[in-house]
Amino acid sequence: MNNENIEKLLNVADQASKAENSREVFVPILDDFEVVENKKDSNRTILVAVKNNTLEQYITDGFLLPGETLDTRIEKVKEDLKKNIPNKELYDNFDNYITYYEDYNNYTFYFKVYAQDILAGTEEKLLCTKQLTGYFVNPERNEFCQISVAAGPYVVDNQHKLLQDIDNLETDETIIGLTKALELIMDNITYY
């Protein structure tokens, strides 16, 4: 076994030890939302709750790799989204449909929040789901996590614009509503 393989093995053992000795993250469910999926295994947690056309989702997505930061992992996620996005023909430039929105800190976790358009339909009748995602690391486990809220789909028109057509995200009604919901969740994410 070469030094690189030994280092990888030691890193996996260290991560497993941290995970075993750390607290779990508590993610609150928004009022009147129904949990439709709640899975947990050794590698990932997925929690999905819905109410009407709004979705709340929490995902753990593995440990940060050695040398990896929250920012580099977010860039990796964006690249994976770009490669695997459904309805690719509707996106002229994927980077126009996901944008940094804000940093957020609840004094337990530090979040980087991104806004995203998820497109469906046809060019003649374009549908868009708006999503805000707070990416964060559970420092006790060095685990990469995502908390998202999404609303839609809506027909793209003067009332429901694409991110690239909104002058100021802080004045868009859908983004305002999603921000309130996401900040309520992020304010109450803690350990149990």
Image (cartoon, helix red, strand yellow):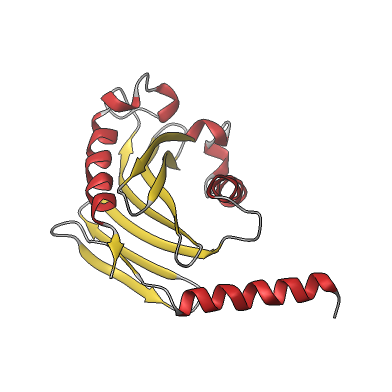
| Camera-nearest residue between 167 and 120 | 167
80 left or right of 119?
right
Q: In which quarter of the image is the N terminus?
A: bottom right
Query: What residue appears at the point 39 percent right and 48 percent down from the top-left corner?
Result: 110
Query: Is 169 situated above or below 57?
Result: above
Quarter-of-image position of residue 167: top left
Furthest residue to the left? 32
9 left or right of 86?
right
Query: Is 125 situated above or below 166?
Result: below
Quarter-of-image position of residue 95: top right
Task: Where is residue 119? Give x, y as percent.
Answer: 44, 41
| Camera-nearest residue between 39 and 134 | 134
Furthest residue to the right? 2
Query: What residue appears at the point 48 percent right and 75 percent down from the top-left corner?
Result: 19
Task: Where is residue 169? Give x, y as percent.
Answer: 34, 27
Furthest residue to the top? 167
Total marks shown come to 0
Query: What residue appears at the point 28 percent right and 58 percent down from the top-left corner?
Result: 189
Q: Quadrant of the C terminus?
A: bottom left
Task: Where is residue 123? Give x, y as percent.
Answer: 47, 33
Query: What residue appears at the point 62 percent right and 53 percent down from the top-left corner?
Result: 68
Task: Where is residue 35? Give x, y as percent.
Answer: 25, 67
Quarter-of-image position of residue 47: bottom left
